[in-house]
Image (spheres, rainbow, N blue to C red):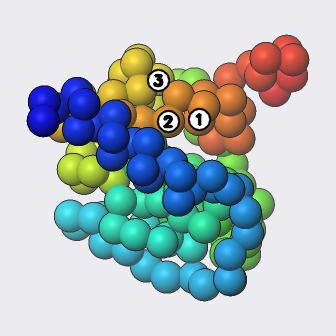
Amino acid sequence: MNKTLFTLLFLFLFSIGNAFAQEKEPEVFNLVKIGDVNVFGKSVDNHTRCVHWHSALDIIAIKFKCCDKYYPCFSCHEEEADHEHEVWPKDEFDEKAILCGACGHELSIREYMDSENTCPKCEASFNPGCSNHYHLYFDVATKAGRR
């Protein structure tokens, strides 16, 4: 079986089991270690997927500016942290703040935004829909023109 066909088959089979990726699951906080990096939140595997976002492509964690901790998603931070979130200012987009859950490579915010949803180290695919949530993490204008 060629690699492309295998990849498509894997994504199809994985998506069947994750048709309701947004569905709430039990409240379980845990710590996942990827390489030397701790990922906090409600992780469901060792690739940074969480109870909120766990499709085959949901394999990044984001370091939050406010606490310098990686979480799989905004909701994990909001449910676990005891403080308000902060967005990364544009002048800090060269900071390493994105973790690839497939290989553990840390990307700067700018590298991540320019990555075309692919890890530059291992070529794993990232969820392109995450760009709809940049405003929760980074100082960018939203589609509606808000901040």
Q: Which element carries disc 2, helix, strand or loop? A: loop
9 above or below 38? above
Residue 88 percent location from the top left of the image: 59, 38
Residue 50 percent location from the top left of the image: 54, 64
Bin the neighbour count of mark 1 within 10 Å (Cα to Cα): few under 14, some 14-19, many 20 and up: few
Instruction: Identify residue type, mark 3.
Output: Met
User: Would you say residue 95 is visible in this rendering?
Assistant: no
The answer to whether mark 1 and mark 2 are in CB contact below 8 A is: yes
Task: Say which quarter of the image contains residue 23.
Answer: bottom right
Residue 70 percent location from the top left of the image: 47, 60
* Residue, disc 2: 127
Bin the neighbour count of mark 3 within 10 Å (Cα to Cα): few under 14, some 14-19, many 20 and up: some
Label annotation for residue 130: 1
Is label 2 or label 3 in front?
2
Q: Quadrant of the C terminus?
A: top right
Is label 1 or label 3 in front?
1
Viewer-nearest residue: 107 or 93: 107
Instruction: Identify residue type, mark 1.
Output: Cys
User: Would you say residue 86 is visible in this rendering?
Assistant: yes
Viewer-nearest residue: 112 or 129: 129
What residue appears at the point 73 percent right and 69 percent down from the top-left corner?
A: 24
